Amino acid sequence: MTNIADTDINAQVIRPTYDRASLKSRIVHLGFGAFHRAHQALFTNEMLEKTGSDWGICEINLFGGEDLITRLREQDHLYTVAEKGANATIVKMIGSVTKSLHPSLDGQQAVLDKMAEEQVAIVSMTITEKGYCADPATGRLDKNNELIKSDLANPRMPNSAIGYIVEALRIRRELNRQPFTVMSCDNVQENGHVARAAVLDFANLVDQELAGWIEENVTFPCTMVDRIVPAATTETLAEIAQLVGVEDPCGIACEPFRQWVIEDNFVNGRPEWDIAGAEFVSDVVPFEEMKLRMLNGSHSFLAYLGYLGGYTHISDTMTNESYRKAAFDMMMKAQAPTLTMPEGTNLESYAKLLIERFTNPSLKHQTWQIAMDGSQKIPQRMGGSLRHHLEHGTNYKWLAMGIAGWMTYISGVDEKAQPIDVRDPMAEQFKVIYQQHGINTSAVKAILGLEAVFGTDLINNEGLVNEITKAYQLIITKGARAAVAAL
Ligand SMILES: NC(=O)c1ccc[n+]([C@@H]2O[C@H](COP(=O)([O-])OP(=O)(O)OC[C@H]3O[C@@H](n4cnc5c(N)ncnc54)[C@H](O)[C@@H]3O)[C@@H](O)[C@H]2O)c1
């Protein structure tokens, strides 16, 4: 079958012009998912176009995505990204990826050997929140996580990302090789600190000397990443095939906007990603908080209440004026007041830009997709802001509605009594709660009792319990659309 590497493709596709053969696997990336393809790999592609350096990427999927890796290899690791604006689409062929591995295809040892190779300077990650095997309430390694338990029993043959990183660093140390920088690009609050805590906690349980060496020699820069990249669907792939002139099973579509703020703290060199528009700063945390609370917080709000309200995509929710207004208020009234930003940051312009991005109808970002893994997302996207308002006695009704929306969503039944495919590491716990309570306001307190999501403090705040119960009651009796309109 012809593919993008061995056939003529449409002339409007922007192709790499640098020498791909000279690229080395200086970056090993864990998580060749939708986002990375349209973000870090694309930034690297544009950096290479302007610098001609040798920073190539080796892609690794630790869980799932075997097929994607196989397809990628068949097309010489080339793939396309379609940047879809409201009026026009730009298609770029990405050349920065030149190698790939998958433990199911190549074996775990091949992955470890690659990560330990001399030239590897950065191990980056987009492995989703659960990939860190961290307890969401404490941010430390969850020692009861099944993957972690089995990796601790057999640390030389790991399965978790954390286990792989620690074992690869152990090998590098043994071989007297420079360590690599561990760079998280996941939407996780203080992602570098979470990665560092998980890696050090794990290493300490395996070998304390190694843990000391990692602590001294490895850095874990925080990054703030932003670009809406919906999962590929049959329709987006068909559209990409038409734009490219041949099928590209690894192709991905995204919005035109992209942002990458990186803490400049690398132990073994780094690419000049700033040449491609990234920003290197000394402290990423304020930017992360801004994005997690304003963008991701309102995205989650729209995902739960949008799904329940019968909207398939985020852009569909934006056609409803009360959702649009609630999302803007959520950003400006519930989230912005909780932030401390560097001077000159204009949060209102940021919120307006977000609403414009959410409205882009050419992006088919599913509410169901964003609604996934809520137990891991709620603490960072809404929990911190909620505590801020409780401390200051300020209005948090948008957050209460968002959380009530999530609580209703995880019942697993929508407003038309149809089942919802709830994907969440805590899904079993949700089932137990709903078996006991049914879709009833008594479920609110039971869910608030989930310590991993809400800690131990929130359930004891009577005002908060009442506010969420009121919102929940409104959603289950009047429906999500009416509940959002009532805000
Ligand atoms: N898609 C977006 O719009 C977007 C925007 C900003 C940030 N992000 C972040 O990027 C990350 C990836 O999102 P995506 O859209 O690419 O999702 P995706 O489902 O396309 O990819 C998920 C990737 O994570 C890996 N993975 C899953 N569970 C894992 C585990 N337990 N251990 C190791 N690896 C694991 C998979 O192999 C896969 O490569 C998420 O943290 C997300 O928050 C996504």
Image (cartoon, helix red, strand yellow):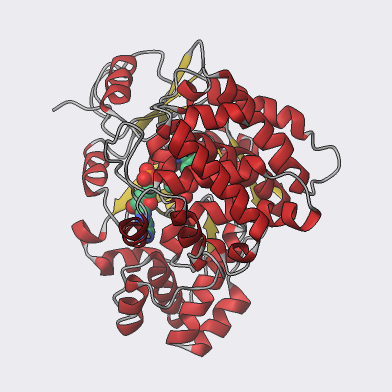
The x, y position of residue 284, in whole percent, is: 69, 52
The picture quadrant where one finds residue 162 is bottom left
| Vertical relation: 195 (above or below) 233 | below
Q: Quadrant of the N terminus?
A: top left
Pick the residue in front: 454 or 446.
Answer: 446
| Vertical relation: 19 (above or below) 203 | above
The x, y position of residue 478, in whole percent, is: 47, 31
| Vertical relation: 200 (above or below) 50 | below
In the rendered image, the residue lying farthest to the left is: 1
Q: Residue at x 64, y 25 (%)?
A: 325
In the rendered image, the residue lying farthest to the right is: 343
How many marks are shown on the rendered structure? 0
Q: Residue at x 33, y 47 (%)?
A: 422
Pick the residue in front: 270 or 31.
Answer: 31
Pick the residue in front: 131 or 451.
Answer: 451
Q: Residue at x 65, y 62 (%)?
A: 461
Q: Specify whether residue 410 is in view.
A: yes
Q: Is residue 286 left or right of residue 291?
A: right
The x, y position of residue 281, in whole percent, is: 73, 50
The picture quadrant where one finds residue 365 is top left
Q: Residue at x 53, y 49 (%)?
A: 187
Q: Quadrant of the C terminus?
A: top right
In the rendered image, the residue lying farthest to the top is: 87
Pick the residue in front: 97 or 63.
Answer: 63
The x, y position of residue 250, in whole percent, is: 30, 35
Q: Specify whether residue 125 is in view.
A: no
